[in-house]
Each structure stands twice: as C-alpha cells, then as structure tokens.
Image (cartoon, helix red, strand yellow):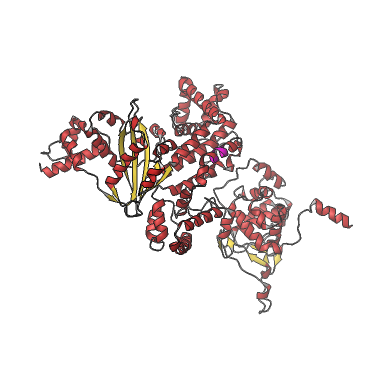
C-alpha cells in the first residue's frame, strides 16, 4: 500500500474517531475492521492504534490572522467530572473574522485541578492557546458563563494596564435567561400547580385502569399516548412537562372527573396561570435557540429582551393577572443591567436588522445611542461619522436585511460607503451573545465524559487526544441543549388536540401571537409607525381574515346591537327601507387600495357643465348628483361609515353588513364622511383624532363585531392609525352631532329657556 495513502488514511480515521468521541482502541474491534475492509481496496492494511496516535502529531493547527477588525472573542465555561473527582475542564471557544463574511469558531479543551482555579492559571491556559493560533489582534472580548467565573477571570488592575491587548468582559446572556426562568418556577402559585401535575401524572402512570383508559383514548384520536417524564433537572424539562400536560388537558380533565380526582388536578385558575407561564418560558427558550448559534452576536440581546418583555405583557392572558406584577418585577430585576450597558446598546445599533426599530426601543433611546457613538469618535473623523450615520439611516429604509440574513454580509456590501461604521461593527459583532456550553462535552451525559476517564492517566497522549478532539467540534451555545428531545418530541408548542371547554382555554394556533422573534418591523408596530407609512396621504389597512374576536362578551354585545334575533328570511323595518337600493355593475373592490377621486367645487363650477348622472348612495338610499357622491374603493372607509350608521340606528345590522361586504361599486354621499368622523369622536367621547391612538374602543367594538362577525379588532394599531388619518381629513366637514346630547348640554339648553 502507498505510504502517503496510508498516512492520509490514518489522519482521516483518527480525525473521525476522535471528533466523535470514539477511543482509538476501537480500531481493534472486529466489526469496525470489517467495515473498513468493505470500503477500502482488497490490499488495504488496517492501521494500528499506535499509527493513529502518531497521526495526531502530523495534524498541527494552522495560524489564523485576525487583521479584519483586530478583535478576538473568547467564550469560557467550566465543567466538572460526574464521578466526583477533583478534576474540572475549562472549555473555551475563540471567534474571529477572516474576511468578515463569516465568523469562525474554534473550540479548546483544557483539564484543570481544583488548585488551578485562579486567574493566572486560567488566563495562561487561554493565552497560550490564542497566541499560538492567532495573530494581529488588539482586542480580546471574554464572555464568561456566570458572574462567579467572571470574578475568577477578573484581572488585577495593575496587570490589566500592563497589557498591550485591550480586554472587554461580558457575562453570558443565557445565565440571565436561566435565572429569570428558574425564579418564575419558584413562584409559590406556579410551583404548587406544577406539583399538582406531578402528582396527577404519578397516579396516571401507577394505576393500570386509568393508564389503559388514557392510552386507548389517545390512540382513538390518533394522538401521542406517551406521557412526559417527571424531570426537574432544569427549567426546560419543567417547561416541556407542563406544556405536554396543557396539551392533554381535555383527557386529563375527563379522567379527573371520571375517577373523582378533581381535587388532585389543576383548577381553571391554575390552568390559566400555567398557560401564561408556558408562553413566557417558551419565548425564553426560543431566544436561547436563536442566540446559541456560532454566528450569533451580542447585538441580538436587546431585541431578545424586548421580545420576552412583550410576551410577559400579553393582554391575551388577563386571567393570569395575579401573576403579572410578580413576573414584571422579576423581569426588571434580572435584565435591568442591560438597559444601561453601552456596549450592548451600540452593538444593537450597529446591527442593520435591528437598528432604529421602534418595536425594540423608543426613538429617544436610539438617539441617545447615536450621540454616544459620535462622542466615542475622535475629533478628526467626527464629521465623517455624522455623514455615515445619515447614510446608514437612509440605507436601512430601503435595504434592511431580513431576519434570516447575516449582518456580516450586509456590512461587507456597504463597508466602502460606511468605512468608519464598518470598522466599529467589526468590533461589536465579533462578540457572541452566549458562552460555549461545557455540559455538552463533559459532565453528566457529556459527549467526551467517557473518553476523559479512559485517557485520564495516559499523560501527554491523552492531552493531545483531547486538544485534537476539541479543534473538530462545532460551537454549541449555552441553553441550546434540549433534554426533552430524547423523549421523541419536538420543541414545546401548544397545539391543543380538542376544543377546550373551561374558561380561557388556549385558542387555535391562528389565535395565538405568531411573531417571529427577529422579524423586521411588520408586526407589533405602534400607531405612530403606521401613520408614518402613508401612500398618497392614506394609511393602508385591510382586514385580517385570520382574526376572530376572543371577547367573552361577544354574544351579549351582539344582542345589544340587534333589535332581536330574527329567524332567517325575516327582515326588520330598517331592512325594508333599503330593499330597493339599485346596485351598479359589478366591479372588483381593491382591498386596502389608495385610489381617491379628489373633488372640489372649484374644479367644475367654472368649466363647462357636465351631463348629470344621478347615483344612489348605498348607505342612505338617497339619489344624488354625480358630484355629490364618491365611489369608495377603500375597505376601511366602508367599514367606518357602515359602523357609525349602524351604531346611530340610521341603518340596520343586515344592511350595514351588506355595505361592508359589498364587492361592487359603492357610492357614498360625501356628507357621510364628515358625519362618520364626528360620530367616531362623539361615541368614543374624545376631543380630537390624536386621542384615537390610546382610547378605549369598547363603545364601538360591539357594533363592529355585529357587522364583521367579530373579525375586526378596532384596537389594532393599524386600524387606529387608519381612523386617525380618516378623522383628520374629514373632521372639519363634520355636521352637528346626531347622537343624544350629553347631560351637560341638556342642562345648558334648559338654562337658556
């Protein structure tokens, strides 16, 4: 056999075996030898264990240049052996840019004794590794897995000042998420509810009759009959357990009633609390999955915190309001320090996916960060920075990258236009959001736990084996381990299999909030955001066909605004008024369109008089001159005019519904615009259109539910912005209010007489 080929074979074999945690002694396994002989030539000689060990000497690490950005980032975590020995492993990863298209991560393992847990030893191990493998770096960013490890790594001030390399210290974001999640599970109400589920599951698993009934029911519905394992090792395990229990609540409730176990099962109030907690913890878990990749950066931390906070404030879970203040307090206590961290704020500002997004931070906060970036620049380039910032903001309006796109590539494409900001981005985007997860490699169920025991007393060869294995591992961030994956389930998602009968059960997936954590600002916008996005001075809005009113008062509100529940085919007196309305020729409605025929008496009174063509208003059934009506193609205007007309009793519910759903030409009297604008202000009891941004829509929501079948939410920020735009354009045309005068008005009128 060719010696070069034999050497290459040894290198590839040792690389594969070591990277997968397979001891080299397994080369003597007969089954493994049969496999090798099957793939190789007949004259292939199986290498010996010594040949494989010798091949490790030939594979020396390459030296990497950090000239792009000059920043080297290191994440550090510690792991203890599970057999109770005094040995621990320091696991660290080095991240750097070679060409800024992609950030490279190299993993390192080092074995330590308890006595070596001090700053000089820890830093010397890392320093030796990075100086041997990296050149041209002037900044080292260290991300520690916990404050305790960061305290060990805290270099004395005199030593820090003596170094030529600048060092920045950070703490892994997963530490804060874990702390927040664990504190939530320690709340007395939550712990009590989860303990109830634990006891109920134990009964279910130990009583054969109940378990058999459960399995048969699940199989009859084609549902998974496997019960979750009771495992409290980490908060993700608890999350998976009660998520599965909430999904199986219908059958659990049936079992508790059939076998008189109601007192041992969760109540409706506890269900609602757990549903709220599940959404919050599931959002935390999704954040860790997104931030645990090798290309994540600290720029994602502030948006992740914003997303978690939005979930804790979700009004859909108002039945869990007893927990909300506690959760809000825990959130503020855990994540408060990120609010004042300049580095995290600047990194988010330099990430084109998040910069200047108002759903993440208010405008004032972005302006403060902009000012700090300017203050941090030298006097010689401050003017250049100001010019680049203006270009940066303009570029983001038209070229903001999608959530799935890399900010690194975006800066590569624009670094010639924004050289100073690109250099700054090189520094901040080089820092990962989380540290490497040492538990993935060592400790209980670690990938190399068994190998470390095998090579514990092998001296230099064992150390070489572990260093070689480390270089061929992929970065695995803290928090990305999923203990419940071993049970055959995907990540927790509430997908209830049966319709819930008790109060405030979870709705179908379409009723849940479905916002991607790092999507661009397409959902979750404020009213002001929608008002700033106009086309031809009109705010665009269209109905959301997936929305369905979840109000528990929906039936009551319908009865309030309907004169009576008439059987099909029976009409009300108001329906008779509109039965002779003449319909025009069919024309497709441009939903959410922006067309508007602008009319002014000055445009036709002085010109040659046109031949009159009378039109009938589809709202009031009056014949009008062509100039006195308008063909309405904007669905939002039809909704508002039909809504106010129905709410004032000027039209029936059936006719208002027909007007809203009309798919043909719809002519409206121009005077209805002013009436509608005035009606909106009067019925909501507000003075001007600006109050529409945050006032209660409850006075009109019932009527809206009646004519839209509960599929339009007046409190939606997009629709609020549309209403503000509509009222601002038409409130000056508003006639005398047509609703019942208020008590103050009656008193003043009686005083005049």
Closer to the camera, 236 or 565?
236
Q: Residue 494, can we see it?
A: no
Residue interval drawn in magenta: 327-332
Instruction: Indicate whether 305 appears above or below 683.
Output: above
Instruction: Indicate whether 90 appears above or below 71.
Output: above
328 part of magenta stretch: yes
Is residue 691 rendered to the left or right of residue 84? Answer: right
Q: Residue 263, can we see it?
A: yes
Residue that sits furthest to the right in the current view: 753
Q: Quadrant of the C terminus?
A: bottom right
Residue 293 falls in which quadrant of the image? top left
Estimate the x, y position of residue 130 in percent, counting from the top left.
30, 45
* Badge count: 0
Residue 25 falls in which quadrant of the image? top left
Closer to the camera, 259 or 677?
677
Is residue 18 rendered to the left or right of residue 567? Answer: left
Q: Main secondary structure of the magenta part?
A: helix
Residue that sits furthest to the front in the current view: 158
375 part of magenta stretch: no
The residue that appears at 75% across and 58% down in the rendered structure is 737
Estimate the x, y position of residue 28 in percent, counting from the top left.
18, 30
Is residue 8 rendered to the left or right of residue 589? Answer: left
Estimate the x, y position of residue 82 in percent, counting from the top left.
35, 27
Closer to the camera, 94 or 698?
94
Q: Quadrant of the N terminus?
A: top left
Is residue 660 rendered to the left or right of residue 476? Answer: right
Estimate the x, y position of residue 658 in percent, counting from the top left.
64, 54
């Amino acid at each position: 056999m060719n010696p070069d080929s034999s050497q290459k074979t040894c290198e590839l074999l040792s690389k594969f075996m070591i990277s997968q945690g397979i001891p080299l002694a397994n080369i003597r396994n007969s089954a493994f030898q049969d496999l090798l002989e099957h793939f190789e030539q007949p004259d292939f000689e199986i290498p010996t264990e010594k040949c494989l060990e010798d091949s490790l000497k030939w594979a020396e690490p390459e030296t990497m240049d950090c000239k792009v950005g000059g920043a080297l980032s290191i994440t550090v975590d510690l792991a203890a052996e599970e057999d109770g020995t005094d040995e621990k492993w320091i696991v660290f990863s080095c991240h750097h840019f070679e060409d800024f298209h992609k950030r490279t991560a190299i993993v390192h393992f080092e074995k330590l004794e308890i006595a070596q847990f001090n700053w000089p030893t820890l830093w010397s191990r890392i320093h030796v590794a990075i100086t041997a493998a990296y050149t041209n770096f002037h900044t080292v960013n260290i991300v520690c897995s916990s404050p305790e490890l960061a305290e060990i790594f805290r270099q004395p001030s005199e030593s820090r000042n003596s170094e030529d390399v600048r060092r920045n210290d950070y703490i892994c974001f997963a530490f804060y998420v874990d702390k927040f999640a664990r504190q939530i599970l320690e709340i007395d109400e939550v712990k009590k509810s989860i303990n109830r589920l634990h006891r109920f599951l134990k009964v279910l698993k130990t009583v054969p009759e109940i378990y058999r009934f459960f399995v048969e029911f699940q199989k009859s519905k084609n549902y998974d009959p496997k019960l979750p394992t009771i495992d409290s090792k980490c908060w993700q395990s608890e999350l998976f357990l009660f998520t599965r229990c909430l999904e199986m609540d219908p059958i659990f409730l049936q079992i508790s009633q059939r076998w008189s176990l109601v007192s041992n099962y969760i109540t409706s109030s506890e269900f609602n609390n757990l549903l709220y907690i599940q959404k919050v913890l599931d959002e935390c878990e999704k954040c860790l999955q997104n931030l645990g990749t090798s290309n994540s950066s600290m720029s994602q931390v502030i948006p992740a915190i914003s997303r978690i906070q939005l979930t804790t404030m979700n009004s859909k879970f108002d039945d869990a309001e007893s927990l909300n203040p506690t959760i809000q307090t825990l959130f503020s206590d855990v994540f408060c320090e990120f609010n004042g961290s300049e580095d995290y704020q600047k990194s988010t500002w330099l990430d084109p996916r998040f910069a200047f997004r108002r759903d993440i931070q208010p405008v004032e906060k972005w302006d403060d960060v902009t000012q700090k970036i300017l203050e941090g620049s030298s006097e010689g380039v401050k003017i250049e920075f100001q010019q680049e910032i203006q270009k940066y903001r303009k570029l983001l309006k038209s070229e903001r990258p999608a959530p799935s796109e890399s900010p690194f590539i975006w800066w590569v494409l624009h670094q010639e236009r924004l050289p100073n900001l690109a250099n700054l981005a090189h520094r901040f985007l080089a820092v990962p959001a989380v540290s490497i997860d040492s538990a993935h490699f060592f400790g209980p169920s670690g990938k190399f736990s068994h190998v470390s025991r095998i090579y514990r007393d092998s001296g230099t060869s064992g150390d070489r084996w572990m260093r070689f294995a480390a270089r061929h591992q992929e970065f695995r961030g803290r928090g990305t381990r999923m203990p419940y994956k071993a049970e055959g389930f995907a990540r927790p998602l509430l997908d209830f299999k049966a319709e819930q009968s008790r109060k405030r059960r979870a709705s179908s997936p379409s009723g849940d909030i479905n916002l991607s954590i790092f999507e661009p600002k397409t959902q979750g916008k404020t009213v002001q955001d929608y008002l700033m996005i106009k086309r031809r001075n009109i705010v665009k809005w269209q109905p959301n066909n997936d929305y369905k009113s979840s109000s528990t008062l929906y039936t009551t509100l319908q009865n309030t605004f309907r004169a009576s529940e008439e059987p099909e085919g029976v009409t009300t007196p108001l329906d008779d008024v509109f039965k002779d309305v003449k319909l025009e020729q069919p024309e497709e409605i441009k939903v959410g369109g922006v067309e508007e025929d602008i009319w002014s008496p000055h445009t036709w009174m002085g010109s040659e008089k046109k031949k009159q063509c009378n039109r009938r208003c589809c709202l009031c059934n009056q014949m009008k001159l062509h100039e006195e009506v308008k063909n309405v193609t904007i669905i939002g205007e039809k909704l508002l005019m039909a809504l106010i007309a129905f709410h004032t009793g000027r039209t029936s519910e059936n006719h208002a519904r027909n007007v809203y759903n009309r798919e043909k030409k719809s002519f409206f009297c121009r005077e209805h615009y002013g009436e509608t604008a005035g009606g909106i202000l009067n019925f909501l009891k507000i003075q001007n259109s600006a109050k529409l941004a945050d006032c209660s829509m409850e006075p009109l929501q019932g009527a809206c539910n009646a004519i839209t079948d509960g599929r339009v939410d007046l409190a939606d920020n997009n629709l609020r912005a549309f209403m503000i735009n509509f009222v601002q354009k038409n409130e000056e045309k508003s006639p005398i209010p047509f609703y019942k005068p208020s008590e103050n008005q009656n008193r003043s009128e009686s005083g005049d007489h």
